[in-house]
Amino acid sequence: MIENALGIPILSILILIPLLGAGALFFFPNGQKEAIRSTAFGVALVNFVISLILLLYFDSSTYKMQFVEKAAWIPGIGVEYFLGMDGISLLLVLLTTFTSSIAILASWSAIEERVKEYMIHLLILEAGMIGVFVALDMILFFVFWEIGLIPMFFLIGVWGGPRKLYANIKFFLYTLFGSVFMLVGILALYYAHGSATGEYTFNLLKLYEVSYPYNLQWWVFLTFFLGFAIKVPVFPFHTWLPDAHVEAPTAGSVILAAVLLKMGTYGFVRFNLPLLADASRAFTPFILVLAVIGIVYGAFLAMAQKDIKKLVAYSSVSHLGAVMAGLFALNQQGIDGGVLQMINHGISTGGLFLVIGMIYERRHTRLISDFGGIAKVMPVYSALVLIIVFSSIGLPGTNGFIGEILILMGLFKMSALATVFAATGVILGAAYMLWMTQRVVFGKITKRENLDLKDINAREVLTLLPIIGLILWIGIYPKHFLSLSSASTARIAEIVERNAPKTERVVHAESAAHAEGAAHVEPAAQHADAHAPVHAEAHGGTH
Amino acid sequence: MPAGLNINFYAVMPEILVTALALIVLILDFFIRKNKAALGWVSIVGLLCILPVAAYTNEPYPVFGGTVIADSFSAFFNVIFIIAAIFSILISMDYLKKIGVDRGEYYHIILFATVGMMVMGAANDLINVYVGLELMALSFYILVAYRVTSARSVEGALKYFVLGALSSGILLYGMSFTYGAAGSTNFMEIAAELGKGDNTYLTLGIILMAAGFGFKIAAFPFHLWAPDVYEGAPTPVTALLSVGSKAAAFAAFLRVFTAAFPAFQADWSSMLWVVSAATMIFGAVVAISQKNIVRMLAYSSIAHAGIIMIGLLAFNDTGLSGVAYYLLVYAFMNMGAFTIVALFRNKGRFENIDEYRGLASTRPLLAFLMALFLLSLAGIPPTGGFAAKFFVLSAAIDAKYYWLASIGVVSTAISLFFYAKVIFYMYMRDPEPGAEIAPSSGVIYNIVLFCTAIGTVLLGVYPAPFIDMAIRAVRPLLM
């Protein structure tokens, strides 16, 4: 069953194209590296273009699932092949298709061995990630979730750095350990829904409609939390991330940071908040504490790193702590900010891993102390690095600022104390990032090897330009992006914040919430440059 | 109980046909002197012809004085047994030549073992369970010792024989207690007697029988024989042992405990709960430290037995059909994995996991298939192993065995560690310079690998029809 304006199963096509591309690559001779690279890039690009077509037909005025496809899969137990997307999924799917294309471009010269298998794994990974974001059946979601694990396992394990085996085992076991518990939670929900309504189904939209007993919610929340928190990673579960990032090849790091981690935060926003609203509220203090610890602790760890890649990896822990804090502010601004910050982090951290990959290809080292003054020899590179660093810090005018300010605004309504600590993350972020930039990019050239570094070539500039473009676009006019997801975030906030009835609500309330959400966003964007922090506080105080 | 014997040869047709096939192979053995593999082909063709008969034999009422019941349950398991036997014989033909014991009786002993399994699956009477079990076990005692020149093989066989005889004794002891308490060996009559008067002896009988079956499925703490026997036996026999023998023991286990002791469900499930949990954890944890791939697979099969037991414990539609489905999937994925192990052993190698290093660059397809089977054993979607685990766990949640299900998923997560280790060696280590390149798989191996791989993937991607089959299969048990 297909319900959309296009009349074609476009989400299935999005998943199938990379898979078919991977299948086609299988038959390429191993030696034809250029052909393999071009084909893989072509496939990813086509997929990106198709995901842009989704934008044209997407109706951002409703939180309802769009482009829905439904078919029986295992009818005996109510498992369906059920795809659909709302604004949050759309943003993340766009991020996925975009990042995948960029990742392939970035591996052009970095990967010389077993290129074919590498590209096959990247494309399978893309299919799995898209599947995670559009699956509306819990089992289908779980299947895609696990499918994404296997190519990543190979990407780190085969093309990774010297300690790849250790990093890989850690990554694989951590994530699998979390996800198997999630499966138990899904099943518990399934039977609870079945015994409450008589209909046994894994259909997410139907599962939404029932209010579950608090006790069950509590346990299911815990299992989901394990699965998603490890993926995000939330504070005590973060130790796999730096290892995996450091050992992964550039494209692997980019995808890991930009998309895979978002699977965890997406899980929270799609499942925990709306499905388990009571438990979400009960767990909020606990999660906010973990998120804030993540923000501050991650930032301090980042400051102490000698390896640039590790620094960025720990900065991810910090940034994703902020995303979690935004989501668990349990109001629309916070969730809006969390969702936007997922995208922002994907763009800026993805970009940072790209530029680290470029310099690593030239010098085969990532130690901060091995660089210094490369602005003199690589001016174009340095300029672009600077913009990405600004975005990561959240400088006004870049995307990071909008996300952070929304998160802090939302969080203030929930807990002023948490906001104070979360805000220090912004300062600390600026500190470690700028300090790193100063030591790497500026100053005098102290190492002879750095004297004859070549500036980045056209392909590399081409890889970075879209990222720079997005950084500025979201930074200057975020409404294009926020408006896509605002109906969905408003709906989620409504369920979790006000404990609204889960069935159909009146149209009036929807439009009101929508207008409110938009009203919050616009002033923040317009006054971004001058007095945004003041504005945020004043705004938070009025509530 | 219908009066009279109710003789119906059609109901036992699959067993008769396989027995006849075994006898034909036995006689042909005298005439075919040189090429003993021909006997293997005769067996395979015969089994393929019997397969549809076995699959469609459905006479859902007890025959032969209530001792045999050829219902959808026995038909489902017959299919598993025959498929396992076919795969096992296919990989045996080449294997036996390589190890230098190319003798004809091998094939008909495998066929007799298959008959034993089928008798177990269709038994409706304790005596029949025992007869089938002994026929299977005696055949396996011979098969395990088949590498006569290898001390390990003989050692394994001796261990299997001594412990197997002991466990048969325990099983028989339990059966005699049950008979003493219930006054009958027929499942339905036992069930009818339950709860009348003092049940002490019946309880004792149940415990002893659980121990007997626990031995055959290699459940903790009756698992001690498995690693040694798996390692010593010729690999095709190990494959059949781990798939067929386990499935047969589970079939009888399910039938006895659901048909004869349903009223005691609360009692036996609390006992089996502990056994299942211990088996899952023990198998998975011990497998981690194994360096030999067969021993690793042996411990993995112990862990799987624990997980399959969850389905029996749950004692509901999903759980019992989950057991049946799991064993079907297990037949494909474990056969596939053992086929690759058998291929490796041909060249007189040992089977250290170390030997798989760099397989991805020397034999990419073989490495890919091995990875597929291992990931399926680990329960990663979209393979059959995931679907199977999913049903069993789902049944546990339905029956409110939350802790058991949690232990099950922990065991799954632990088990991933050692399955992934093999994949590491294949993909992420370079082959040792100068090392012998892995043997190329012949046509026969390729057929087996292709079929098992298709089965493993199909049962994961499109499980619906097979699950319906499994649900139909267990329906007689829950009536």
Image (cartoon, coloured by chain):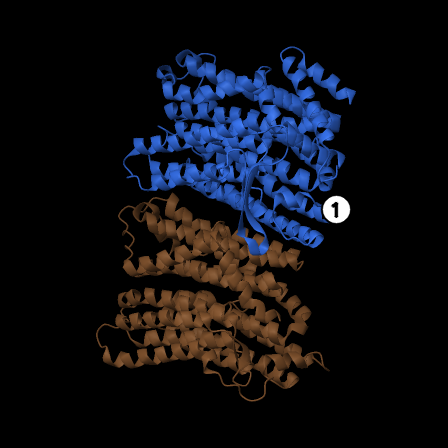
Chain colours: A blue, B brown
Image location (x, y in percent) of residue A143: 52, 46
Q: Quadrant of the C terminus of chain B?
A: bottom right
Please name whichever residue, A470 or B143, is drawn nearer the observer in this view of the structure: A470
Please name whichever residue, B161 or B59, is drawn nearer the observer in this view of the structure: B59
Kindly give the residue lying farthest to the right in the view shown. Answer: A542
Image location (x, y in percent) of residue B123: 52, 78
The answer to whether residue B156 is seen in the rendering is no
Please name whichever residue, B446 or A315, is drawn nearer the observer in this view of the structure: B446
Kindly give the residue lying farthest to the bottom in the view shown. Answer: B4
Q: How many marks?
A: 1
Q: Quadrant of residue A335?
A: top right
Q: Quadrant of the N terminus of chain B?
A: bottom right
Residue at point 31% right, 42% down? A27
Tell me the kind of residue under disc 1: Tyr
Residue at point 34% right, 44% down? B430
Please name whichever residue, B5 or A167, is drawn nearer the observer in this view of the structure: B5
Q: Which residue is mark 1?
A: A214
Image location (x, y in percent) of residue B62: 55, 80
Residue at point 68% right, 34% down? A492
Q: Please give left or right for residue A358 compared with residue A7 in the image.
A: left
Chain to which the residue tagged by mark 1 belongs: A
Secondary structure at badge 1 equals helix
Image location (x, y in percent) of residue B299: 48, 61
Kindly give the residue lying farthest to the left in the view shown. Answer: B34
The answer to whether residue A502 is seen in the rendering is yes
**Circle 1 residues within 10 Å: few <14, some 14–19, many ≥20:** some
Q: Quadrant of residue A16?
A: top left
Height in image: B369 above or below B4?
above
Residue at point 51% right, 41% down? A171
